[in-house]
Amino acid sequence: MGKEYTLWSMFWRRFRHHRLALVSLFILIFLSLSVIILPFVLPYDYAEINLKERFQPPSLSHPFGTDDLGRDQLVRVMYGGRISLAVGLIVALFSTLVGVVIGAIAGYFGGILDNILMRLTDFALIIPALVILMVAGSIVAGGVLEIILIISLLMWMYVARLIRGVFLSLKAKEFVEAARACGASHFRIIVKHLLPNAVAPIIVNITLAVGYAILIESALSFLGFGIQPPIPSWGNMLQRAQHTMILYPWLTWFPGAMIVLTVLTVNFLGDGLRDALEPTKVVEV
Amino acid sequence: MFAYTVRRLLHSIPVLILASLVVFILMQYAGDPLARLRLNPHVTPQDIERLEKEMGLDKPLWARYARWSGDFVRGDWGESMSHHRPVLELIVERMKNTLQLMSAALLFTFILAIPIGIYSAVRQYSKFDYAATFFSFLGFSMPIFWFGLILQMILGYYLTRALGFQLFYTASMYSVGKEYDLINRLQHLALPTITLSLAYIAGWSRYQRSSMLEVIRADYLRTAHAKGLSESKVILKHALRNALIPVITVIMLDMPALFGGAVITEYIFAWPGIGRLLHYGILNGDYFLVMGIVMVSAFLVIFFNLLADILYGFLDPRIAYK
C-alpha cells in the first residue's frame, strides 16, 4: 500500500515548495512572538519618558535608539507592532466576514436583494476610500476599535463579489437542490453546502487583507487620522519622526522597516497559500 | 458611443448624491467650524449667533444638505472658512497641481511597468523575471509615506551632501523666483513622482506579465510566428494590443487609489495640491471645502471608470457599446 495522503498533508506538500512563503511564515511567527513577549521582557515602558536620554542612537542598552522624549524605541516599535498586527488581523477577519455575508445573501437569494447589494458594492468601490477614511478618522479621534471598524467598512467589496460569483454558479447545482428537498433551511444550505466551496479563496483573501489593512492603518495614523499618541503605532511613530528625520534617522528607519517586513512576509504567505490551496487556479504569476 | 457615454454619466448621478450625503453627515460630527471664533474674546455670542444663521448652522441637517446641494449644482460651492475664498476657485487652482503630479506618475509608471511586464512574460522564469517578481512584491508592501521619507533622506539629503549641489528637491513645486524654470520644476517633481509610482509599477507590471503570458500561447500568435514575422513584431504588434486590454482596465480602476496616494505624497512633499488642501480642511472642520474636494474626487473616479470603458472599446473592436 502506498502512503496515505490527507487533505492537510497534500496542502503542506504543496506549500513547502513555495520557499519564500515558508520563510515568511517563520519570520511572521518570530515577529508575532516578539511583539507579544518583548514588551514584557524589556526593562522600559512604551510611555516611559527619560529626558536625560533624548535622541540616543542605537546602542546595546537601546537597540533601536530613543526618541525626542528619551523613550526606548525598541519597546515602542514592539508595542506599536501589537497594535498594527492586531488592527491588521481583526480588520482582515471582520471585513471578510462582512463581505461573505453580503456576497452570500446577494448570490443565494438573487433578485432585488442582489441588485441592491451589488449597487451598494459598486458604490463602495467607486468612492475615494482614503478621503472618506480621513474624514471618518478625524471624527473617531483615534479609538482603536473605531479605526478597525471604519477600515473594515471600506474593504469588504472584493470578497463580496467573489462569494457572490461562487454562489451564483453553484446554487442551481443538484447537490443544493437535494439539500433543499431534504428540508434544509436557507441558512443551512448557505453555511454547510455552499460556503465550503469558497474556503480556499476566503483564506487567501484574509491573508492578503492583513497586509493591506496594516498599510492603510499606518498611512492613516501617519496623516494624523488613525491611532493617536500616546498609544504607539508604526504609522504615528513615523509621523513624529519625519520632522527630525535628517538628524535622527533611526527613528524613521525602524518603524518603516517593520511595516515593510510584516507586509512583505504576509504577501508572500498569501501567495504560497494561494498556490497550495487553489492548485487549479495558479495563473503563473 | 455618445449615447452610451451620456447614459453612463446619468447613472453616476445617484452615486454622487449618495457619496455627498454620506460625507455631509460625517462632516457634521467632524468638529465645529466656528470653534476658533468661539474662543476669540473679541467675538461676542451675538456675532456667533449671526454667523450660525448666515451659514445655516442653526437649521436641521436635511435643510442644510438641501441648501448645500442646491447651491452646489448651481456652481456655488460655498466659501472656505479657513482660506476665506470660494471653494470652487480654490479647488480649481490646486487641482492643476494635483493633476500635474498624477499625470507625471501615470506616465512614469506606464513607461516602466509595461516593458517590465512584457519582458518578464517573454523571458518567463529568467533571472530578470524572478527579480521583477521579488521587487513587485516589495513595491506592494511598501508604505508610500515611508518610501517618500526614505527618498527625501537619501536622494534629497545624502546625495546633495555627496554631490555638493542639490539635484532633487524635497518640498514644494519650484524654488522661489524660478516658477518658469522647467529644470527646476522637474527637480521638484522627480521625487514625488517616484514615490507615487512605486506601488503601481509593481502592480501594473504584474498584470501586464500575466495578461501577456495568456496571449503568448494563443493560436494566432503561433500563426504570426509561422508566417515568419520577427519576434519583436509578433510581441509588440500582435500580442501587445490584446494583452494591453485588461491592463488598461486595471489602470483605470486603480485611479481612486492613485488619488489617495497623491493625497499622501502631497502631504510629505509639501506639494500644494488638492490632497494637502483636504488634509488642512479636515483638521480645521472646513466642511464646504471638504465637501467640494470629496465631490471632485468622486467625479474623477467616475470619469476614469468611463474612460476605461471607452478605451476598452477602442482597443478591442469586438466590444460594441449600445
Image (cartoon, rainbow, N blue to C red):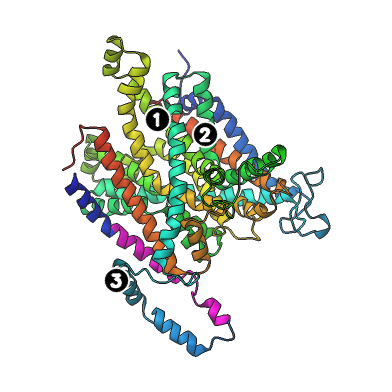
Question: Which amino acid type is shown beneath numbered disc 1?
Answer: Gln
Query: Which residue range is magenta in the image?
Result: B15-39
Horizontal and vertical percent position of residue A79: 66, 51
Residue receiving disc 3: B70
Question: Which amino acid type is shown beneath numbered disc 3?
Answer: Gly
Q: Label 2 vs label 3: CA separation? A: 47 Å
* Residue drawn at the location 72% of the way across and 41% of the way down: B161
Horizontal and vertical percent position of residue A223: 56, 56
Question: Which amino acid type is shown beneath numbered disc 2?
Answer: Phe
B56 and A181: which is toward the camera: B56
B16 and A114: which is toward the camera: B16
Residue receiving disc 2: B137
**Looking at the image, can residue A140 be seen?**
no
What kind of element bears circle 2?
helix
Among the two numbered marks 2 and 3 on one chain, the one whose residue lies closer to the N terminus: 3
* Residue drawn at the location 32% of the way across and 22% of the way down: B237
Residue receiving disc 1: B208
* Subunit of label 2: B
Horizontal and vertical percent position of residue A130: 46, 54
Q: Are marks 1 and 3 on the same chain?
A: yes
Neighbour tally class for label 3: few under 14, some 14-19, many 20 plus, Cα within 10 Å: few
Q: Label 1 vs label 3: CA separation? A: 45 Å
Label 2 or label 3, whichever lies nearer to me, is: 3
Q: Are marks 2 and 1 on the same chain?
A: yes
Q: Is residue B188 toward the left or the right of residue B212 in the image?
A: right
Q: Are marks 2 and 1 in contact (CB under 8 Å)?
A: no
Neighbour tally class for label 1: few under 14, some 14-19, many 20 plus, Cα within 10 Å: many
